[in-house]
Amino acid sequence: MAEQAITDNLDELLAVLPPGIRDGLARQGQLEALLEIVLDFGRLPEARFPDRWVVLAEVPVRHEELDHVMSGVGEFGEDNRAGIERTLHRISAIRNRSGRCVGLTCRIGRSVYGTVDIIRDIVESGKSIVLLGRPGIGKTTKLREVARVLADELDKRVVIVDTSNEIAGDGDVPHPAIGRARRMQVRRPELQHAVMIEAVENHMPEVIVIDEIGTEAEATAARTIAERGVQLIGTAHGNTLDNLLMNPTLQDLVGGIHAVTLSDEEAKRRGTQKTVLERKAPPTFDVVIEIMEFDKLAIHHDVAETVDRFLRGQAAAPEIRLRKPDGEVEVIPPEELPFEEMLEVESLARPAPPTPIRGERELRVFPYGVSRNKLERAMRDLGLRARITRSPSDADVILMLKAHEKKSPAKLQEAARQGTPMHILRSNTQQQIAVALREVYRLRQYSAEERALREARQAIEEVLATSRPIELSPQNAYLRRLQHRLAGQYDLASESIGVEPHRRVRISK
C-alpha cells in the first residue's frame, strides 16, 4: 500500500502574516492540524483547528495588518480569492460596501500523496467519476491526487480547469502536486463552463478534472465533455447521490428526472399509478463516490441502475471502502454490510414508500373539494392504513378546502354535529393533505427502515410470547435483510416467502 505523505508549505503562509500574529501561531505547536487563520478588522485574530480555536493576539486586527497580508499574496480575483504562488493556500477577503478589505480567511492548503489507492481501480477504468461530500472532507485533495496519478503514472493527457486555484495553487506555475497535468485558470467563476468546453476543443485532453460543478451551464458543459468520449473527474455540490438527484440544477449529472404517463395496462402491470418518475437521459457520470469520511467512501458503480432503482422505490446500497490504520484498503460489498453499517450509512437506503403496519386502525376519510388523487398519494406515501369513504356519515375524519367551508352541504354539517372531526385545508396540495393526515392519525413519519424494523420487533415479541410464526408485510430485498438480521439477534428463524412484489419475511421459533 502507498504510504500517505502530506505537504503543506506552511512556512510560505507564515511569512506573509504580521509578526505579532505569526508569533502567536508559533506558540501553539501541532500546526499540522491547522485549518485556517481568521483575521477580522476590530476583532481578535483566531487560529482554527478541527476540535478547537485559539486567539493569536490580545489586540484587535488593524487595517495595517490586513494590508500587510494582502501585499504578500497574489492578486485577488473577482471571487475575492487569492493565493501564494506555488502553494495551495487560499486567502479569501471580506469587503465592506466601499470595497475595502475588512476580513481575511487564510485557509491552509495541503497536498496528500498516496490516497488514490482506495479508488485506483475505478480511476484506471476510464469511467467518469463525481465526488460528493460535505465541505472540508477532502474532495479537492482526492481530485488533485487523481489528476497526478492519471498524468504521471498512467501517461494520460490531463487538463485541470482550476477556477479558484484550489487544485493547482496560485501563480502561473502550478503546484507540483498535480504532476504533469496541465492547468487552465478561469478569469471569472461564471466563465467556468466556457473554459471547460475550451479545454476539450483546444487541447485534446483524455481527462478533464473540474472542481465544484455548481450551475446548470457547468452541468451542460460536463455532459458535452462526456459525450465526446473524454473521461471527466469532478466534484459537485451535495453530500449524497440522492441530494444530487433532487437538485434541479445538477440532476442532469445523474441523468435527470421527468414524469411519464403510463397506459392503464402498463400501470397495472407495474402496480403503480399512471404518472411515474423516470430517468430522462444517460448519466453524465458513470460512478458516484460519496466521501463519508476522509478514508471511508460509499461507491455507486452504476449510476444509471442506482437512479432507476431509486425512482422505482427500491434499495440501492453502495459498496463501502475504507482505509485501515495500517494502510490496507477494505472493500465491503453491499450484500456483506454489517447490520449496524446499513443503518449508519444514510445513502444506503433508497426505500420504497412505507407499507402499513399490522394492527394500526384503518382511517376512513371523506374529502370535500380535496383532490382524491393527491389524497390517495398522501396516504400511500405516509404508509397509512386508510381509505376514502363515499359518505361523511361513515368517515373518521372530513377533509375540506377552506373555500368550501361556508357553503358546506347539510350532510357535512350533520356529520360535524355528530362529532366527526373536520379539518380545513388552506390549499389543495399534497403537502397540506399530508399535514392534516398526520395530525389526525397522530403518526410519526417513520423512515422505511424504522417501519420495517418496528414491525419486525412487534412480530418477534409475539413469536417469543406465543411460539406462533408471524408473516410480515412485503418489503424490498434490502429491508427484508434488515428484518432477517434482527430476528437472528433473538435466535429466531426467518425466511423469505412469496414472489415479488409480495415477497415477505416469516419469523418463527
Image: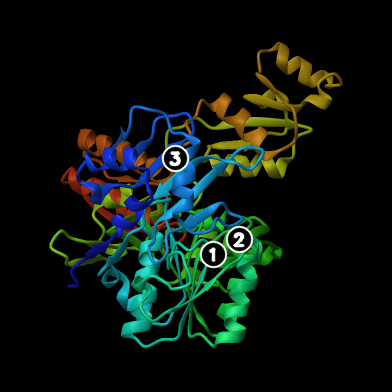
Q: Which quadrant would residue 150 be assigned to in this image?
A: bottom left
Q: Is residue 492 visible?
A: no
Query: Mark 2 touching mark 1, by CB under 8 A?
Result: yes
Q: Amino acid at mark 1?
A: Thr
- Residue pushed farthest left? 326
Residue at (61, 35) in percent of width and height:
434
Residue at (26, 72) in percent of width and height:
117
* Res 387 label: none
- Quarter holding the N terminus? bottom left
Q: Which residue is mark 3?
A: 65
Q: Is residue 250 above or below residue 343?
A: below
Q: Which residue is mark 2?
A: 189
Could you give the CA–CA distance between mark 2 and mark 3, rounded to whole angstroms? 28 Å
Q: Amino acid at mark 2?
A: Pro
Q: Which residue is mark 1?
A: 163
Q: Is residue 252 above or below residue 82?
A: below
Q: Tell me where residue 332 appears, x and y as whole percent.
A: 25, 64
**Which type of secondary structure does the marked residue at label 1 adopt?**
loop
Bin the neighbour count of mark 3 within 10 Å (Cα to Cα): few under 14, some 14-19, many 20 and up.
some
Q: Earlier in the sequence, mark 2 or mark 3?
A: 3
Q: Is residue 201 above or below residue 174?
A: below
The answer to whether 237 appears left or right of 11 in the picture is right
Camera-side residue of 19 and 40? 19
The answer to whether 413 appears left or right of 187 in the picture is right
